[in-house]
Image (cartoon, rainbow, N blue to C red):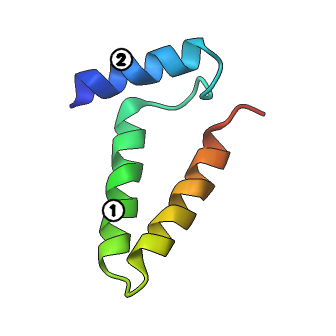
Amino acid sequence: MRDAADLLLTRAQQAGAVRPDVTAIQLLKLANGIAFSAEREPDGDEQAERLLSLALTGLRPA
């Protein structure tokens, strides 16, 4: 999974779609955190969408 994440992230960074200081491990941890927190909430789907939206906004280059 890490190899696939590394490859996808590298391509996204080369395309200018993701900031260059993000690592694949950080993204995997972020996805895990979002999934974990969504499982614990009654409105987990909505919470996951909101957290993912916030994360993606923060990943875009300035």
Contact between labelled residues 2 and 1, with CB atoms less than 8 Å apart: no
- Relative to 16, residue 5 above or below: below
Asked which quadrant contains residue 45, the reply is: bottom left
- Residue bearing mark 1: 35
- Quadrant containing the N terminus in the rendered view: top left
Q: Amino acid at mark 1?
A: Ala
Outermost residue, left side: 1
Number of residues whose C-alpha sits closer than 10 Å to that of mark 1, classed few (under 14), some (14–19) or many (20 or more) = some
- Residue bearing mark 2: 7
Query: On residue 1, which mark appears?
Result: none
Q: Residue at x 53, y 21 (%)?
A: 12
Q: Residue at x 27, y 23 (%)?
A: 4
Residue 35 x/y as whole percent: 33, 62
Residue 10 x/y as whole percent: 46, 16
- Relative to 10, residue 22 above or below: below
- Relative to 47, residue 41 above or below: below
- Quadrant containing the C terminus in the rendered view: top right
Asked which quadrant contains residue 39, the reply is: bottom left
